[in-house]
Amino acid sequence: MKMADTSLVQFSISKGDLAVSGAVPAAYFEASVQPAMDKLLQEIASRSSGQSAPEQSGAAAKTGASGPLDLSVKTICQRLSAKTGSDLLKAGAVSLALVQGQQQFTRKEILAEAQKAAGYWKASYSNDAGRYVTTLQSQVFLIEASSGQLSLSAKAESEMMELLTREA
C-alpha cells in the first residue's frame, strides 16, 4: 500500500496592506498555488515598473527559462549591500530565481551561483554554506519546496523584485 505524501508547503505573499498565507499539500501547491503566485508576482513587478506583464509562450513559459530581471549576481550583491556569507547566498538564490527563472534549486546550486560574485565571495564562506542556508530558511527567505529543493518564499520574492527593480 502506497502512503500519500502529506507534507505541507507553507507560503505567504504580501503587498502593501494585503497579505495572504497558508499551508497546503505539496502537490496542490505545485499544481495550483505556485503558478497563481508566480503570475501575481509577475503582474506586481510589471506594474511597479510601469509595463504590462509580458506573456510567455512555448518552452520558456513551461521551463521558466529566464526570469524577470537581467542582473549579475555581483550586481545583486551590490544592491543588497552584501557583507556576510548569508548575504552572498541570498544573492545567489535571488539570481537563480529572478534572473535565471528557476523556481526550485539545491543548496549546491545556490553556492555555485554565489561564488560567481567576484570581489564579494570569500573561500571561507564555502565551509559555512549549510549554516547560511539554514539561517535563510529560519528567516523564511528560503523555503523547502520539496526534498532537497529550495525556493524563495513568496514574501522574499516580492521584496527582492521591489528592491531590485527600483531605480539605482
Image (cartoon, grey):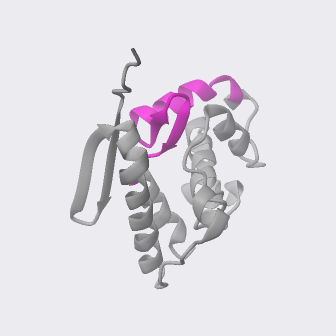
Given residues 64 and 85, the one toward you in this image is 64
- Identify the residue shown where x is 55% and y is 50%: 103
Q: Is residue 139 magenta?
A: yes
Q: In this view of the protein, can residue 81 be seen by the observer?
A: no
Residue 145 within the magenta-colored segment of the rendering:
yes
Name the residue rendered at 43%, 57% in the picture. Answer: 35
Point 38% across, 27% down: residue: 5
Q: Residue furthest front?
A: 1
Question: Farthest residue toward the top?
Answer: 1
- The spot of residue 111 in percent (x, y) is 68, 36
Image location (x, y in percent) of residue 57: 60, 71
The N terminus is located in which quarter?
top left
Q: Residue furthest left?
A: 17
At a point 63% along the width and 51% down the height, the residue shown is 96
Judging depth in this view, the residue of 102 and 160 nearest the camera is 102
The reply, left or right, for residue 70 in relation to residue 43 is right
Start and end of the magenta stretch? 126-154
The answer to which quarter of the image holds residue 26 is top left
Find residue 145 and report its horizontal and vertical position in percent: 46, 38
**Picture coordinates of residue 33, whole percent (x, y):** 36, 52
Using the rendered image of the protein, determine whether residue 55 is visible from the camera's viewpoint: yes
The image quarter in which residue 24 lies: top left
Nearer-the-camera pick, 160 or 103: 103
